[in-house]
Each structure stands twice: as structure tokens, then as C-alpha cells.
Image (cartoon, rainbow, N blue to C red):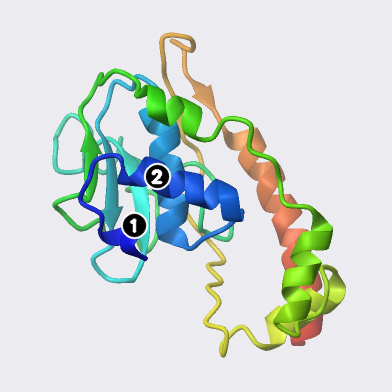
Amino acid sequence: MLLDRNPRPMAPIIGSKQVALYQGGKCRQHADVGYTLLSGQKIDAPVLMVNDQHQDHGYCLIGDPRDPRWGETDTVVVDAWPGYPVASTLSQSTNRQPEFPAHYQRAPGAMPLQAAQSALHDVSPVEKSAVNAFLHGKEWPAVGHGLLKYLSENRHSLNLRDEALAVQDPSTVYYSHNEPAGQTMDDMAAETIEKQTRGRAGLNRFDGT
């Protein structure tokens, strides 16, 4: 996509609008959305959009691992792509080696961008009938167990990523002016992992694993 190579600082915001319009995208488009949401806030840490050194993958960071004020221990990974989407720092993540210089970067304490705040306002989800019409055009099964079975059986030819574990330790505590004592996301992460584990167990029945 041309958006991937656009050097303008507003490119991620433009990209996030395209993601909202088409209701999907690859990792870079997910990173556009993450960067846009973060750009609409004042954050007391740098915000970066990066590629990975060892894989064709893009994501965002809150903090900078090159800066001793954050390092890998306090740099948070913002990645909507992993199979288990749990909060993690860079030191907790597996298969994350950010490449520098970053594609886009915001300084600590940068003022919120109004364009970012309005970019994803009033997003309406695509209706199931429209998704099924798209799948029918590709001669794929409709949304449901048939589609899950098809994707599982053809994941290699379709080049589908299946990252079973995003982090080694999902225990991450966040601190802010609203939560000076810190807040952990363990309960939410555990619930998310349990739900997705059940889903993967269902997929494994089709796999025979």
C-alpha cells in the first residue's frame, strides 16, 4: 500500500481512516489505528511506530527501549496482531525486536492531535451479511464453524499467522495521574486468555491436534 511508504506525519491517521472504512487490515494497518489512538492523547512517554528486525511485522511502542528512562522493561508494546492480545512490555514479549529509526514518533508530553481524536469517531461495524457476501465472492464458507475449519485447514497456503503466545508474563502494572497506586491488567488478561484458549481448543478439533 502507498500508505505504508507515506513519509507525511499524518499518514498513520489517514491509514486508520482506511482501516475504519474497510474494517480490517494487516499488522501495519493495525499499527496505524494504535498510533492514531495514542496520538489523540497526551502521554508522558514517547510513542513510536516501528517495524521488526527479524520478521515482516509492524507495531507501536509506548516508551523507547534505547532510552534508559524506559528501556525494554518499561516500554509497552501496542500490538493488536498477536493471538493472545494481552498487555506486555518489550522485555516480556516474544519475537519483538524493534527496528530503528522508527517510522513515526511522538515526543513525551506531546499535545493531542485533533485530527487523531476525530479520525475514528462514529465507526460503525460492518454487518455480517456484507462479510458473508465478501466471503461468497472468494468462494469461502460463510461466517461460522465452516469458515473456521476452512481457515484451519488452509492456514499454510493462506499464510495465516498463528502466534500462540504473545508474552511470557502478562503481569503489567500501569501508573498514571488517575491511578497513582498502579493498576494491573491480570484479571482482564486471564479472562481473555481463557476465552481464546477455548476457541483454539475448538479449532484443534478440526486440526486433529
Percent across and percent down for residue 198 are: 78, 60
Residue 149 vs residue 100: left or right?
right
Percent across and percent down for residue 112 are: 35, 20
Q: Amino acid at mark 1?
A: Leu
Residue 132 visible? yes
User: Residue 174, located in which quarter of the rendered image?
Assistant: top left
Circle on res. 14: 2
Which residue does the image show at 72% across and 51% down from the upper left? Answer: 126
In which quadrant will I find the C terminus?
bottom right
Percent across and percent down for residue 82 are: 52, 59
| Label pair 1/2, CB-CB below 8 angstroms | yes
SS assignment at label 1? helix
Q: Which residue is mark 1?
A: 3
Percent across and percent down for residue 70 are: 23, 33
> Is residue 107 or residue 115 the one in the foreground?
115
* Other-residue count near label 1 (Cα within 10 Å), few / some / many at <14 / 14–19 / ≥20: some
